[in-house]
Amino acid sequence: MITESIRQLIDNIPYVFVATADQTGQPHIAIGDHMRISGNSILVFENWFCPTTLQNITSNSHVTVVAVKKDTGTGYQMIGTVIRNTATAFLDGYDPAIQTPDTPQVLTRFTVKIDTILEFTGGIHSDLPITTERC
């Protein structure tokens, strides 16, 4: 499912956009970095995700991850499910004089099983899932 062209894109961009939604469907977008691909359908990335992203994943594990080429604005929309949510590092508290409460205190890694990949572009496109032949 994750083709060589998608691998090359992910290897050459600094981050992806991660769209989540709460139980009511209210959307939220975050950024994931330190990406890697495992096998042909698993995407792994992490960040100091804000409380909204973490709450959304707890109640609704469905996500869309968008990888975009900075120079063209084209890329791929990968639709899937968070299958693992791992805390990988913790801050040792915060200084209220510098940071506000609710500042992310945990570096979180998401492991996402990709089910569908769509072309991501502002141009004419079909929203049909991409097959290996189309990539």
Image (cartoon, rainbow, N blue to C red):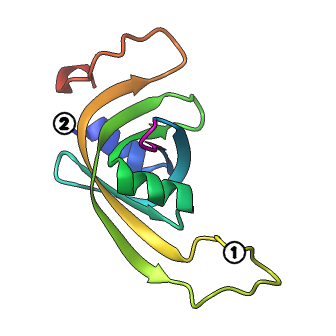
Which residue is tagged 1? 101
- SS under mark 2: loop
User: Which residue does the image show at 28% across and 26% down from the upper left?
Assistant: 135
The residue mark sitting in front, 1 or 2, is 1
For the residue carrying disc 2, how many other residues have a C-alpha within 10 Å: few (<14), some (14-19), or many (20+)? some
Residue drawn at x 47%, y 8% as measured from the top left: 124
Q: Secondary structure at mark 1?
A: loop
Q: Amino acid at mark 2?
A: Met
Q: Is residue 96 visible?
A: yes
Say which mark, if any, is on residue 123.
none
Instruction: Reply above or below: 125 against 42.
Output: above
- Would residue 14 be visible to someone looking at this image? no
Looking at the rendered structure, the number of numbered marks drawn on it comes to 2
Q: Residue furthest front?
A: 24
* Residue 75 painted magenta: no
State the mark number for residue 1.
2
User: Relative to 70, does residue 73 appear above or below in the rendering?
Assistant: above
User: What segment carries the magenta color?
Assistant: 20-24
Q: Amino acid at mark 1?
A: Pro
Magenta portion: prevailing SS class: loop
User: In the image, what residue occupies the spot 45% across and 44% down?
Assistant: 22
